Structures are given as C-alpha cells and as structure tokens.
Amino acid sequence: MGIFNHKQALADTPKEILNWRLYWSVAVFGILGASRGFDEGLVGGMISLASFNSEFPLEVGTEEEIANRRSNITSMVQLGSIGGALLAFVLCDKIGRVRSLQVLCLLWAMGFAIVISSFGSIPQILAGRFIAGLGIGMTTVVGPTYLVEVAPKSIRGMLTNVFAGAVYLGVMVAYFGNWGCSINISNSSRAQWVLPQSIHIIFAGFIFMLSWTVPETPRWLIMTGKHEKALANLCTLRNLPNDHPFVQSEIIAVTQQLEREKESTRGVSRWGKLRELIMIPANRYRLMLGIMSQLLGQWSGASAITIYAAEFFAVLGKTGQSEKLFATCILGIVKFASAYICAFFLIDFIGRRRALYCGIALQTVSVCYIAIYLGVVPNSRAGLGAIAAIYVSGFGWAMGWNSFQYLVNAEIYPIRLRALGSSLVMCFHFVNQFGNTKAVPIMLLSMNNYGFFAFCTVVCALGLIWVWFFVPETAGKSLEAMDALFALPWHQIGRHGKELTADLGSHSEAAHVDDLEKSEFEVEEYKK
C-alpha cells in the first residue's frame, strides 16, 4: 500500500475520529506490551548480577547443569505465558477485554511479589515467575485484540503497533534498571536485583488503575448483545454523534458480519469454534499465517539476543560487567526507537508485507555478518562491526517480525474467532519462546556462537521466502473486509490478494457494506 493510498484513506476519515479519547484508550492497552519487555530485559541481567548469584546457588555442577538451571529461571515466565494465552481466550470472550486486562494485572503483580519475597529459594522464584507468566501471556492477546477493535482502519497499523513498540519500552527500561543498579548498589545487597524486579509490580498496579478509565470495545458488546452500550462506546471513541453515517456504517458492518457468522455456525458448541478455525480453509490459512510467523520469528535469533544480550556482548568483546550491561542499554534504545519509528511512519505507509520483507532482510544480513565474524575472524577489528550488526538486527526485528506478529494476528480473524485465534497463536508463540530460551544456552555450548548465528541466518532466509509466497497485504482494509481477502484461493492470497480485493481499501467507511457484498460476489466469480 503506497503513501498516496494512505493519504486517501485518511482523507476519507472524519477528523473527529482522531481524538484524545481514542488515543487514551490505545495508550492504556498499548503500554501492556511493556510487561514482556520488562521480563525479557530484566531476567538476563538479573541472573548475571553478583548479588543474585551470591544469594541463589546457580554456579554449581557441570556447564550443562548450570546452563539448565539458568534457563529454567529465564524460561519460567514463557511457560506460564502458554497457559496465560489460553486463559485469555476464555476471559476475553466471557468477561470482555477491559475486565481481562484487570485480571492479568493482578496475576502479573502477584507473581513478582512472590519472586522478590524469596530468600535463596529457587523453587519460589520459579513459582512466582510462572504465576506472573499467566498474566504476561494474557497481555499478548488482550492488548492487540482491544487495539484492533477500537482503531479506525486508516491508522489501525499505527495504533496496534503501540503494543509492539511498548515491548521495547519495557526492554529499554529494564536494561537501564539492571545497569544502574549494578553500578550504584553494592554487590552484597539483595536490593541490587530486587529493585529492578519491583518495576513489574509498580507498572501492573499503574495499568490496573488506568483500566477503569477506558471503554469496552463496541465489537465485543455487539457480540454479547449489548447494542445500545456498543453504540454509546463507539460514539465516545469516534467523538461523533450516534446518527453520523460513519458511526452507523461501522455498527452495521460489525452487526452484519456477526449475523453471517452466527447463521453459518448456528447450534455449534464452544468446541465447534476450534473445529471451525481448523476445518474451514479461509480460517486455516489465517491460523497458518499466525503459527508460521511465530515459528520463523522466534527462531530468527532476535528473542535470544534480547534475553541473553549481556552474554552475546561479552562474546563480542564487551567483557566488563558495567560495559556489557551498558551495551545492552544501547540495544534497548535502538529497539525502542525503531519500533515506534516503524509504528508511526512505516507500517501504514508502506504496508505490512513490505515492512516485514525489509525487516527480515536487514536481520538476515546482520546475523550472517556476526556468524562470519565469529567463525572466521574472531577477536579482530571487525568486532565493532559485529556489535553494530547486533543493533542493526534489532532494528530489522522491530520493523519486521515484531510489528507483524501482534498486528496481523489480531486483525485477520472474524470477530467471534478473534480471541480464540489470537490465543492459540500466542500460545504457540510462548511454546516457541520457552523452547528457544531453554535451547539457546545448550546450542551455544554444542554449536559454538558462530554456529548459532549461522542457524539464525538460515531461518531468516526461509522467512523471506515464506513472506514472498504467503503473506497478504492487509493495510487499509476494515476488519470486516478481511473475509473477502481470505476467501480467495490459497495460492492467490499472499501474492495477489491486495490487487484482487483492492477496492475494499479505496472507499469510505460509509460504503463498506456494499463493497463487502460486491467483493464476495467477485471472489465467487473469480473462483469459478
């Protein structure tokens, strides 16, 4: 989607829609992404701090035993997040997006209260991190689901990627927290590792209080039969009267899509939703997009670099405790800045597909350079280039997989399957991240550092091929218009879906219902 088309979409959007009520709601749910960032940035630094190692017996046994003990601690939040992602499906559809936010904040804070109250007990650390993981896992479903449901289609990519950007706000704050405590608090004081972990509790409490100031999504309210409340909330979010054509067309589009879904699945049980997700070809393609993006994204190396950043910088020459933690701070700044640059200036302007392609290309080149440096010319002057490549890979990840995995996963599903589809994909996300976090220390021992980065290079290259064949462009399309895109033959969705359903992104919201009916007819004719 080009810049010209994006300007046209904005021109068709009433200016009242871009108002402070919408932005406030987006900020409250978007900042949830920081929960994952805090943990990914804090846990690697925590287990490397002298105060933590003096309190907990980590450095006991063989190299493999030490690596397993460390990976158990770092990966326990990911293990809890698997259950959290599934729990989010049940709660999101049953009690709504806002109440689900409040539940996850309580779990998140409770878990880290258990962590910081442990005194030398590794089992208590593991239990607390698992409980916190339940809440953190829910954020990846609750946050993006709310954001795509309240965002106008013309800026849906930008607003939804506030969540993806917040992940690296959390990472940046975490890196600076670890670094600051390492140089300002004595190695003999447990406050050196406890204070950074307390950020979780403070932040969870802050979001919990703010959650009482935001409205529930109109789409969930319509799904539960609360049509008057849905209209009132939509008017609040859009800052328009209830008889405005834009508001009326949006309500009609959502209602009609739900009616079509209910009619086609009447009498189906709760488990029928899962069968519907797997058995219907259009939904199966949606699920494939989510699962493959998680598989390829998680094993591209970016998550491992974030969590084990201090260790990787040590391998590349930053050997001092303060020096390597400061290098991680710079990485946090790079990822934070690039995530929001991509969210505000790229994802809606150049489109999801092009941003993903460019991001993976940058990642491929940078991790390949690191692999060559470590395998061929280690300890040379090229080490500075390898450190720079770490930062470039961070920019590529923020532009590509990080933006794609939350935005597209949340926006491609029908309303009644959105929570289920997002939950299953994010469950798979955390299964992969858990496996990745557990496997990386062992991979570094068995494959050496250059072998690990060579493996990541191959995964990134496979990602480029997959994007070219299978990833469709969804920028500028309303959520209800996604059905026409995924009704195309599977081999046309990725490479030609944008052109075959282009008319759905070029008209005003008021004409959306007619466009959708026309598109469905054209798709059937095309398939014939």
Image (cartoon, rainbow, N blue to C red):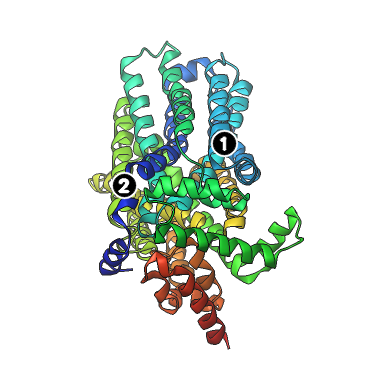
Q: Is residue 320 above or below residue 475?
A: above
x%, y% of residue 3? 26, 66
Q: Residue at x 55, y 15 (%)?
A: 117
x%, y% of residue 22? 38, 45
Residue 31, quarter of picture: top left
x%, y% of residue 301? 44, 49
Q: Are marks 2 and 1 in contact (CB under 8 Å)?
A: no
Depth check, front residue: 81 or 455: 81
| Quarter of the C terminus within the rendering | bottom right
Which SS class for mark 2? Answer: helix
| Quarter of the N terminus within the rendering | bottom left
Which disc, if any, is residue 165? none
Q: Residue at x 47, y 58 (%)?
A: 408
Q: Is residue 277 above or below residue 380?
A: below
The first of marks 2 and 1 along the sequence is 1
Depth check, front residue: 225 or 100: 225
Which SS class for mark 1? Answer: helix
Residue located farthest toward the front when viewing the structure as drawn: 243
Depth check, front residue: 133 or 3: 3
Depth check, front residue: 68 or 265: 265
Which residue position is annotated with label 1? 99
x%, y% of residue 438? 56, 40
Q: Tell me which amino acid carries mark 1.
A: Arg
